[in-house]
Amino acid sequence: MSEDWAAEWQPLAAAVGRDFSDGTVAFGADAVEPGTIRRYAEPLEIGCAIHYDAAAARAAGHPDIVAPYTATMVYSVAPMWRPGEPTLYDSAERDAQPARSPINNEDMPLGPKTTGFFATDISMEFLRPVTVGERVGRRGRRLISCTPKQTSMGRGAFITWESELVTDGGEVVARVRTGTYAYNPVRPEEEQR
Amino acid sequence: MTHQRSFEDVTVGEELAPVAFPLTVYRLVVAAGGNRDFNSIHHNTAYAQASGAPEMYASTFVLMGMWERLVRDYIGAAGTIRSIKDFRMRKFNLVGSTVEVRGRVRDKRPDGAGGIVTLDVESVVDGQVTVGPGTVEVTVPSASAAG
């Protein structure tokens, strides 16, 4: 039935407004460091001295070198692998995916399993930039909206989440609203169904 | 060093100097290493195409960083970014294309030792808007504070 795929999203759509987190802060893999700032800024060729020169950062009113604002969320990304965990690379197939990844849709709390996933939109409010030595974590995972829709990419749902980015000192440094599209590609023979 | 713009320098309606970002495989791989978004859709053609995209494409982190580069070049070291809104990715920013990021001053208002400036920003590929148009709200110091 053509509506079956959309009906599978109803449990998630019915949960709009719920915070799916346990209230704790999930910290990212790396502290804010000059090296990680440099690697973020390098492909973008962001050359402002506050991102690599401590004296310039202090002259601009910061306690030390600061990360680009848009990198704040990067510092909340969990590690791919931790010592003691099973290997991520359990296949030599050319395009095999890691067994686990912090950036995908595998931890969806409700709704159907999907193989496709990408971000669609984002809004961020920054209270301040993060400084070398700090750690950043994500707190809260409130479901703002869930709208099933078939697109040229497949069948899935547009989903918006809201969370805060918090330092290891307990300070909220940013608030984030992230829209995503989680979907399963539709094969041509399924198009008419 | 970036130029330190003062609030008095800011003119409503003025255009920011656009920044062009040619998207090569090499650049996307360097970017993935820097922002840790290793999703294969951003560096693997076959995988991206199996997901329904025409090619590998730039990640959210890369595209947001492009906006920050444009804005930081304008506001200088003493400027701050307060928010990014309506950052909507309308089309894929595919490898082999050049993303041009453009901005224009929508509004300015005094605030403390400087002012708050609202910028309209968008990313464009081959004349089509791929990201935005959205707004970035920034602060810039007054001429006296900017030194």
Image (cartoon, helix red, strand yellow):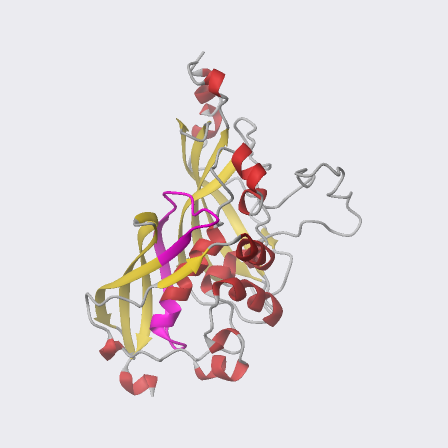
Q: Residue furthest right?
A: A84
At horizontal 50% and vertical 22% (from top left) the residue drawn is A187
Residue B142 position in % (x across, y down): 28, 81
Left or right of residue B116, residue A158 in this image: right
Q: Is residue A91 left or right of residue B52?
A: right
Magenta stretch, residue numbers: B71-100
Which of the pair B124/B134 is nearer the observer?
A: B124
Q: Quadrant of the C terminus of chain A?
A: top left
From the top left corner, tell me how far across and down residue A50 is, in percent.
48, 76
Does the magenta run of residues contain B3? no
Asked if A123 appears above or below A70 in the picture, the reply is above
Q: Position of residue B124 (x, y in %)?
A: 34, 52
State which quarter of the image contains the N terminus of chain A. top left
Q: Is residue B26 above or below residue A117?
A: below
Q: Is residue A126 visible?
A: no
Of residue A36 and residue B85, the one placed in the foreground of this image is: A36
| Vertical placement of residue A176 versus B49, above or below | below
Is residue B135 something one can see in this rendering? yes
Q: Residue at x 34, y 71 (%)?
A: B74
Residue displayed at 37% across by 64% down: B19
Q: Is residue B84 magenta?
A: yes
The image quadrant that residue A33 belongs to is bottom right
B7 left or right, relative to A83: left
Above or below residue A124? Residue A120 is above
Expressed as whole percent of the image width and height from the top left, the position of residue B28 reads 54, 54
For this orientation, the residue located farthest to the front is B96
Total marks shown come to: 0
